[in-house]
Image (tube, helix red, strand yellow):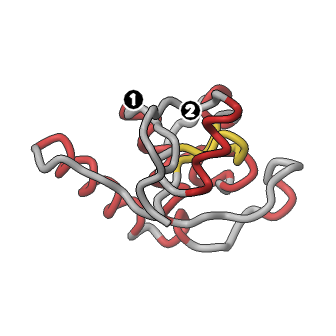
């Protein structure tokens, strides 16, 4: 699920962006939420989760340790496994849909994320 207002460069440290060859378009796009995730069990999803797990086991990517002043000037904080998940989704071409909670209702108002479905979780 996507969060259009939370830009990747604000919540993903530079080490992840570089390690995953994140383009300028990727860096300026909204981050994906990893709060809850829905997968269809298939070979592709298994491979995706395996790659995500593998990247999350790399301390330099998952930790809060950073290159300090080399982060984007608007960088706020690293979102750890969510940051890796988000960039990986974009590399794999996985589309984002609005968050199916009350938070996602704001995305409907802004027409910024696809997802013509009611609030599912509260």
Is 24 on the left or on the right of 40, as rendered?
right
Dot 2 corresponds to which residue? 113
Q: Position of residue 26 (x, y in %)?
A: 60, 32
Is 12 on the left or on the right of 97, as rendered?
right
Q: CA distance from mark 2 to mark 1?
A: 15 Å
Is 14 on the left or on the right of 84, as rendered?
right
Q: Which of the pair 88/29 is nearer the observer?
A: 29
Q: Earlier in the sequence, mark 2 or mark 1?
A: 1
Q: Residue at x 50, y 48 (%)?
A: 86
Q: Position of residue 1 (x, y in %)?
A: 47, 46
Structural crowding at the residue carrying mark 2, measured as other residues with C-alpha within 10 Å and reported as few (<14), some (14–19) or many (≥20): many
Q: Which of the pair 71/32 is nearer the observer?
A: 32
Q: Residue at x 67, y 73 (%)?
A: 65
**Are the residues at dot 2 and dot 1 in contact (C-beta closer than 8 Å)?**
no
Q: Residue at x 63, y 39 (%)?
A: 107
Structural crowding at the residue carrying mark 1, measured as other residues with C-alpha within 10 Å and reported as few (<14), some (14–19) or many (≥20): few
Query: Foreground mark, 2 or 1?
Result: 2
- Residue 58: image quadrant is bottom left
Dot 1 corresponds to which residue? 93
Is 6 on the left or on the right of 84, as rendered?
right
Q: How many labels sit on residues?
A: 2
Secondary structure beneath dot 1 equals: loop
Q: Position of residue 22 (x, y in %)?
A: 57, 36
Secondary structure beneath dot 2 equals: loop
Residue reaching furthest front? 118
Q: Which of the pair 110/88 is nearer the observer?
A: 110
Q: Position of residue 105 (x, y in %)?
A: 61, 46
Q: Residue at x 32, y 62 (%)?
A: 54
């Amino acid at each position: 699920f996507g969060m259009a207002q939370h830009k990747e460069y604000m919540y993903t440290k530079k080490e992840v962006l570089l390690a995953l060859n994140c383009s300028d378009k990727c860096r300026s796009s909204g981050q994906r939420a990893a709060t809850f995730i829905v997968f269809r069990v298939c070979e592709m999803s298994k491979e995706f989760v395996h790659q995500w797990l593998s990247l999350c086991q790399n301390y330099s990517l998952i930790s809060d340790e950073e290159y300090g002043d080399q982060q984007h000037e608007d960088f706020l904080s690293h979102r750890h496994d969510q940051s890796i998940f988000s960039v990986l989704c974009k590399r794999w071409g996985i589309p984002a849909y609005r968050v199916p909670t009350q938070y996602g209702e704001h995305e409907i108002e802004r027409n910024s994320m696809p997802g013509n479905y009611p609030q599912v979780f509260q």
